[in-house]
Image (cartoon, rainbow, N blue to C red):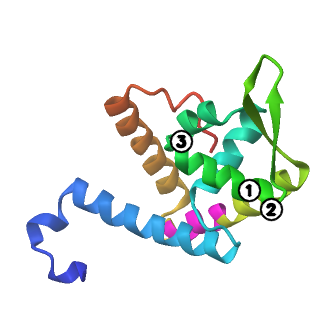
């Protein structure tokens, strides 16, 4: 799609502009993740969640990052085979496993953090640092308003 051929009335809509920005962000993240050997963008969110929360069940991990159970299972299996995650029986409930990030997973997450930061930099290149900060603050407010989440207290900038 060529944005120049879009009707003028669409080009002035926040929803259209946000969608176009989101498409570019997804493209940039996808390219960076692919170059880093990541086959699914969900790998980054799973590793980040485990790095923050510590060992957790696959079901809780999936809920935390908003992934379907089968997608979590496939991703955890692949990340485990690559040595980035480990699974151990939950001492409180032997019917389930706890997933934890390994030392090599923490190192890999740091590499992915750098790729994500580079993608953010590329996406927001036309903006000054002050404009970036303002944009992020406004996006947080919009998401908080529509989801009821409180992001502004926990968002790392």
54 sits left or right of 125 in the view:
right
Circle 1 SS class: helix
Q: CA distance from mark 3 to mark 1?
A: 15 Å
Q: Earlier in the sequence, mark 3 or mark 2?
A: 3
Mark 3 surroundings: few (<14), some (14-19) or many (≥20) residues within 10 A: some
Q: CA distance from mark 1 to mark 2?
A: 5 Å
Circle 3 SS class: helix
Is 28 drawn above or below residue 140 in the view shown? below
Give the magenta range. 116-123
Q: Which mark is residue 79?
A: 1
Location of residue 31 in the rendering, given as x and y in whole percent from the top left corner: 56, 75
Q: CA distance from mark 3 to mark 2?
A: 20 Å
**Mark 1–mark 2 CB contact (< 8 Å):** yes
Q: Determine the residue positioned at 70% across, 53% down.
A: 77
Q: Which mark is residue 82?
A: 2
Query: 43 or 28: which is nearer to us?
Result: 43
Place residue 84 in its image quadrant: bottom right
Q: Quadrant of the C terminus?
A: top right
Is 95 drawn above or below residue 49 in the view shown? above
82 sits left or right of 62 in the view:
right
Given the current orientation, which residue lies at the most extreme right position?
103
95 sits left or right of 65 in the view:
right
Q: Residue 3 in magenta?
A: no
Q: Dot 3 corresponds to which residue? A: 69
């Amino acid at each position: 799609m060529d944005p120049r051929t879009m009707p003028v009335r669409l080009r002035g809509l926040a929803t259209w502009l946000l969608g176009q920005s989101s498409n570019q962000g997804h493209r940039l993240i996808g390219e960076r993740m692919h170059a880093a050997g990541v086959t699914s963008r969900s790998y980054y969110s799973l590793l980040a969640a485990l790095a923050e929360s510590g060992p957790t069940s696959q079901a809780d991990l999936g809920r935390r990052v908003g992934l379907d159970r089968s997608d979590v299972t496939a991703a955890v299996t692949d990340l485990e085979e690559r040595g980035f995650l480990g699974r151990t029986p939950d001492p409180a409930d032997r019917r389930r496993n706890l997933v934890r990030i390994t030392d090599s997973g923490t190192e890999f997450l740091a590499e992915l953090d750098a790729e994500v930061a580079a993608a953010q930099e590329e996406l927001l290149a036309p903006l000054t640092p002050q404009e970036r900060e303002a944009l992020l603050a406004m996006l947080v407010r919009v998401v908080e308003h529509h989801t009821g989440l409180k992001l502004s207290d926990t968002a790392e900038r």
